[in-house]
Image (cartoon, grey):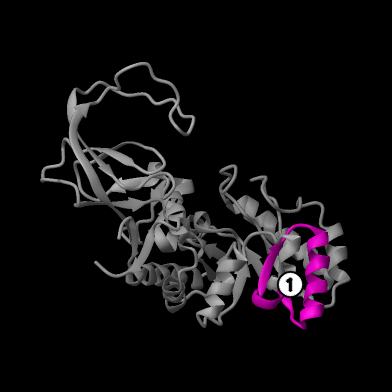
Amino acid sequence: MYPEMVIDTGKVAANTEKITAMCSRKGIRVFGVTKGVSAHPEVARAMLEGGCAGLADSRMENIRKMRLFGIREPMMLLRIPMPGEMKDIALNADSCLVSMPGSVTMLDRACREAGTTVGIIVMVDLGDLREGIWPDQTGEIAEALGMCKRVRFLGVGSNLGCLSGVLPTEKNLSLLVDVGRELASSLDSPLDVVSGGATSSLSLVEECIIPEGVNQLRVGEGILLGTDITRGRMIPYLLQDTIRITAEVVEVRRKPSLPIGETGADAFGNIQVFEDRGIRRRVIVAMGRQDIRPEGLTPVEAGFSLIGASSDHLTLDAEDFKGPIEPGDTVSFIPDYGAMLAASTSPYVRTRIRSW
């Protein structure tokens, strides 16, 4: 059944091995981020087999799923916690990213009730303006941590590149290390973790300029796709053809390239602009925005180009495709991170594990 997303876990494991080996030489442990494939257990195991110290996901549903599949390695909750999920975190997660003093207090209460302990990584906002305390405002969260009995301060972390596109640098990650040392000192606690970002931080490791003291990275995109979208690069020492999304052809016709009649916005409110290229062969596959992020798809075979997508249909220009194509055939694509994330989340896209 189509559409389907096929994941080559051998290539995922190979990418993981290269990343963890490179990071290990700098004293950095890697947590594999599983949310991009909705925590598929076989992909999670490939990350662990490749050398990840633990796994990280933003959804407690995914962490519970991996636990049910028998994965016992350390699990980190990536998204700062909702008040309503503290009990779940206390029962299933080993560590959690936090940014609010109240979250620390609530999680400590849940851990006392559950008889468990959860490690806390305090998020520091280094300029991307998503979650985190300001670097010069550690006092309030230090006070909350100092009053806790069951949560344990592990260290600090930061998120970069996801909201505003601010990249990790030697300067801002050095600031993160300094904040971690300040917090650890005020709590009279060791600084076990300085979590210096995600795939976008790998280039600093490659160039040997990641600050001393950063000892953890949370990596998903690099492992799963071999890319770094924030820096616009294919990581040269990693494999890119790790995941393919395939859809079935439902129509092949020759049609004008320029719409006929008065036009407005499409079904998603976008104003489309088309170039008159004459009559061309067009292919429609049964996959749309309810399944994937079409802008993030690259056709595997030459000769196809994306025209547009509605909720259920993806329309391609196939004039330059050299082979025959008809309904019932399939077209495969390599996704970027957004397209992979959407496909793995859609209930209409089947996920399979295999090698090619």
Q: Is residue 28 visible?
A: no
Q: Residues within 10 Å of mark 1 (few under 14, many from 20)?
A: some
* Amino acid on which disc 1 is placed: Lys
138 with respect to 52 (left or right): right
163 with respect to 322 (left or right): right
Residue 168, given in percent of the width and then of the height, sits at 57, 51
Q: Residue at x 68, y 57 (%)?
A: 176
Extent of the magenta region:
90-118
Question: Which SS class for mark 1?
Answer: helix
Residue 332 lies, with reference to residue 270, above or below; the image says: below
Residue 136, given in percent of the width and then of the height, sits at 80, 51
Q: Residue at x 69, y 77 (%)?
A: 91
Residue 90, given in percent of the width and then of the height, sits at 72, 75
Residue 123 lies, with reference to residue 278, above or below; the image says: below
Name the quadrant of the C terminus.
bottom left
Where is residue 315, by image quadrant? Answer: top left
**Residue 102 lies in magenta, yes or no?**
yes
- Residue linked to disc 1: 87
Q: Is residue 106 visible?
A: yes
How many numbered discs, if any? 1
**Residue 250 lies in magenta, yes or no?**
no
Residue 28 lies, with reference to residue 255, above or below; the image says: below
Q: Nearer the viewer, residue 15 or 310?
A: 310
Name the quadrant of the N terminus.
bottom left
Residue 335, given in percent of the width and then of the height, sits at 37, 52
Q: Residue at x 42, y 55 (%)?
A: 343
